[in-house]
Amino acid sequence: MMARIVFKFLPLLLLAVIGVCASAKAQQNGSFNVGGDINKFYPVTWSDGAWNFNKQTELHLGRSAVHTNSQWRGAMIATFNFHANNWGNQAHFIDAHIINSSTGDPSLRGFVAGWLDVSSNNSSKRIIIWLRGGNTTYHFDSNVTVSPIVYDGVQNPLPYVTPNGSASYDIKTEIDQYAKVSGTVLNHPLHVRGGNSAIMGNLGIGTTVPTNKLEVNGTIRAKEVKLEATNWPDYVFEKGYELMPLDAVNSFIGENGHLPGLKPAKVYEEEGVNMLELNQKLLEKVEELTLHTIGQERKLEKMEAEIELLKLLIKEKL
């Protein structure tokens, strides 16, 4: 009799187990508001719902309408792919792609101030994304259950404290450097295996606001650097080139404190050094110095010849 009862309810039990697993893995979407001050960013924690399924959690966060909440509050579309540390497990990361609107009040531009995996010394499997307050609305959609919790001092008290009390996280008053501009932020190195990669805008290394095609805030080490050259200064050796006399060079240095044709040190310090221009100018000075040296050599040879002639004349008179 007992066997019959178990057999009868077995399909229901299997369906219940499948339902629990499915709900744990189910997609989640919704919206929430972050209260507090509009000029501050508040911690919102998110669960890594895909952790137990051995894959990344994919979170879409956005506000499409630029006038949501108030006139020109701003728009944002962001994607966060992440896998939590969960107390020392190694394959953890947070990769983000964020696009912010470029209109409205510049002081209110940007909704995400930063993010952090806060599960390195606990089993919460949660990350923090700091979001702008001021009763700002955010919509989200994810491939698994992420259960956002807002810590804005209204919905939940500040600061956010990890489950074991090992760390706490409060508001941010400024956007972290890596999150200040629209684009993609990767948690690990990017390797391009093959093909040609093109960057049509400016590329910054160590800086988020490059104003040149390549801008590096640090040291560059290379086996070779090749510059496209025009107007190479061999014109110094052409007939008709006016070589500045050494006394004129001396006067110029005395008045200006640098060589003719070069800029003052203050200009180089403020504007940087154009390597091609500087190499051309330095070679020009080397070639001019070579001509001066050749001229001095000829004068010395002439003086030596005259000295030898004078020696002969004096010897004959003796």
Image (cartoon, helix red, strand yellow):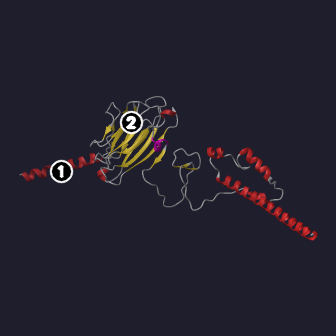
Who comes first in sequence, dot 1 or dot 2? 1
Tell me residue 4's x, y (percent): 9, 52
The residues tagged by marks 1 and 2 sit, at their Cα atoms, a distance apart of: 50 Å
Mark 2 surroundings: few (<14), some (14-19) or many (≥20) residues within 10 A: many
Q: Which residues are magenta?
A: 176-181
Q: Which residue is mark 1?
A: 11
Tell me residue 9's x, y (percent): 14, 49
Q: Nearer the viewer, mark 1 or mark 2?
A: 2
What kind of element bears circle 1? helix
Residue 307, quarter of picture: bottom right
What residue type is disc 1 on? Pro
Q: Is residue 299 magenta?
A: no
Q: Where the C terminus falls, by quadrant? A: bottom right
Q: Residue furthest front?
A: 318
Q: Residue furthest left?
A: 1
Residue occupying the point 76% across, 60% down: 290
Q: Which residue is mark 2?
A: 171
Q: Residue furthest right?
A: 317
211 and 68: which is toward the camera: 211
Mark 1 surroundings: few (<14), some (14-19) or many (≥20) residues within 10 A: few
